[in-house]
Image: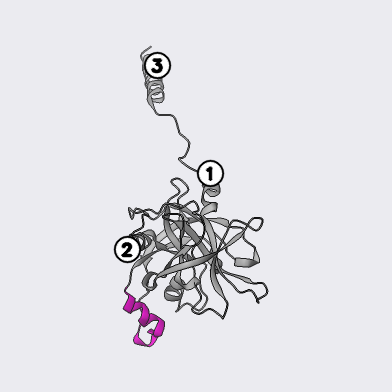
Amino acid sequence: MRNSVIRHRIALSVSLCLASAPLPTAAAGTYADAIPAIKPSVVAVGTYLKTRRPPINMLGTGFVVADGQHVFTNEHVLPTTLARGESLIILTGSDENGQARSVVSTVRRSSHDLALLRMAGPALPALRIDNTNSAVEGQELAFTGFPLGIVLGLHPVTHRALLAGIVPMVIPARSSRELDASALSSLRRGNFKVFQLDATAYPGNSGSPLFDPTDRKVYGIVNMVFVKTQKEALIKDPSGISYAIPARFMVELLQGEGLTP
């Protein structure tokens, strides 16, 4: 009889706990929800030369920010010089309804491989940039861009990315013999931390927005050349690890230009 009473009390206690426990709720956002909202803000950066075949050369990815007329990309995406008659352009839309827009101004921040472009034409949907410096290791993110450039056409694709580590930009040289011109240039710029991603990105992904699907904020900008050159210069066979520049450097650049992230 005593054991029966005890079992009854335990069962009642468990029932009360289950009744008072909150029911599971759906995630604030999913990849399937976020991707269609992100893609209209993702653009390609390239050049146009009427006499060239094809006349358009896609160089990398960018994304719309602030007032809808500004685009972030990596500085290394931009050509160092333009041929006679060649112009820097932004490609919006997709292959079916793509549009080329001229770039009317460019602000560069070489220290963090950032470029802020202002494009002609009406505003596009702008992505929000995280201004709290709140990204953490283990955070599930994604990036959308053009991994192989013009090879796959104007069709942005999305890759999932775990924020695997927040690591120093520059790997210290083991001896002075390893301090080449690139390493010395990096030391002059100063070291800072970047995001190491557990994801595969390609050179065309440079400039892609790194976003969290739950809040759709941009936490970084994918960088496939500038960072890898510094961190993997001493590796004979470069790894498949990808990197991103944290959002706080974009926030600083926007605020310096009087724009809201």
Residue 225, how many percent across, how many down? 48, 72
- Position of the N terminus, as image quadrant, is top left
Q: What amino acid type should be assigned to the residue bearing mark 2?
A: Gly
Residue to which mark 3 is pinned = 8
Residue to which mark 1 is pinned = 33
Location of residue 165 by image quarter: bottom left
Q: From this viewpoint, is residue 256 visible?
A: yes
Q: Return the residue nearer the eye: 249 or 166.
A: 249
Q: Tell me the tag on residue 256.
A: 2
Q: Return the residue nearer the eye: 209 or 95.
A: 95
Q: Is residue 107 above or below residue 212?
A: below
Query: Is residue 7 found left or right of 190 in the rendered image?
Result: right
Residue 84, how many percent across, how many down? 56, 81
Please say if the residues under marks 3 and 1 sit with CB atoms less than 8 Å apart.
Answer: no
What residue is shown at x 46% (from left), y 58% (from top)? Answer: 69
Q: Alpha carbon of mark 2 to alpha carbon of mark 3: how far?
A: 68 Å
Tell me where the magenta segment starts and ends, as one range. 173-190
Location of residue 57 by image quarter: bottom right
Q: Alpha carbon of mark 2 to alpha carbon of mark 1: how far?
A: 33 Å
Query: Is residue 57 found left or right of 210 in the rendered image?
Result: right
Query: Is residue 114 found left or right of 31 in the rendered image?
Result: left
**What secondary structure is marked by label 1?**
helix
Q: Return the residue nearer the eye: 224 or 107.
A: 107
Q: What amino acid type should be assigned to the residue bearing mark 1?
A: Asp
Residue 107, how many percent across, how many down? 40, 69
Q: Decide whether residue 39 is among the magenta residues.
A: no
